[in-house]
Image (cartoon, helix red, strand yellow):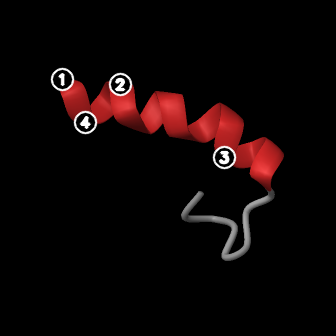
């Protein structure tokens, strides 16, 4: 996400759950 200034919605669908998991740790 940080590498792409304009992530597509498809990318967000994959990245968001990973970020949420990382934040929950």
In this view, 15 is above or below 25? below
Q: Are marks 2 and 4 in contact (CB under 8 Å)?
A: yes
In this view, 20 is above or below 3? above
Q: Which residue is mark 2?
A: 21
Mark pair 2, 4: CA separation: 5 Å
Mark 4 burial class by Cα count in 10 Å: few <14, some 14-19, many 20+:
few
Mark pair 1, 2: CA separation: 7 Å
Q: Which residue is mark 1?
A: 25
Name the residue located 42 percent from the left edge and 38 percent from the top edge: 19
Pointer 3 or 2: first along the chain: 3
Mark 1 burial class by Cα count in 10 Å: few <14, some 14-19, many 20+:
few
In this view, 18 is above or below 15? above
Q: Are marks 1 and 4 in contact (CB under 8 Å)?
A: yes
Mark 2 burial class by Cα count in 10 Å: few <14, some 14-19, many 20+:
few
Name the residue located 18 percent from the left edge and 23 percent from the top edge: 25
Mark pair 3, 1: CA separation: 20 Å
Name the residue located 53 percent from the left edge and 39 percent from the top edge: 16
- Which element is circle 2 on? helix
Instruction: State the mark number for residue 1.
Output: none
Q: Are marks 1 and 2 in contact (CB under 8 Å)?
A: yes
User: Residue at the left extreme?
Assistant: 25
Q: Which residue is mark 4?
A: 23
Pointer 3 or 1: first along the chain: 3
Q: Which residue is mark 3?
A: 12
Q: Residue 12's spot in the image, x, y percent?
A: 66, 46
Mark pair 3, 4: CA separation: 16 Å
Name the residue located 59 percent from the left edge and 39 percent from the top edge: 15
Q: Nearer the viewer, mark 3 or mark 1?
A: 3
């Amino acid at each position: 996400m940080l590498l792409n200034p304009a992530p597509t919605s498809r990318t967000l669908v994959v990245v968001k759950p990973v970020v949420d998991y990382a934040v929950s740790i």
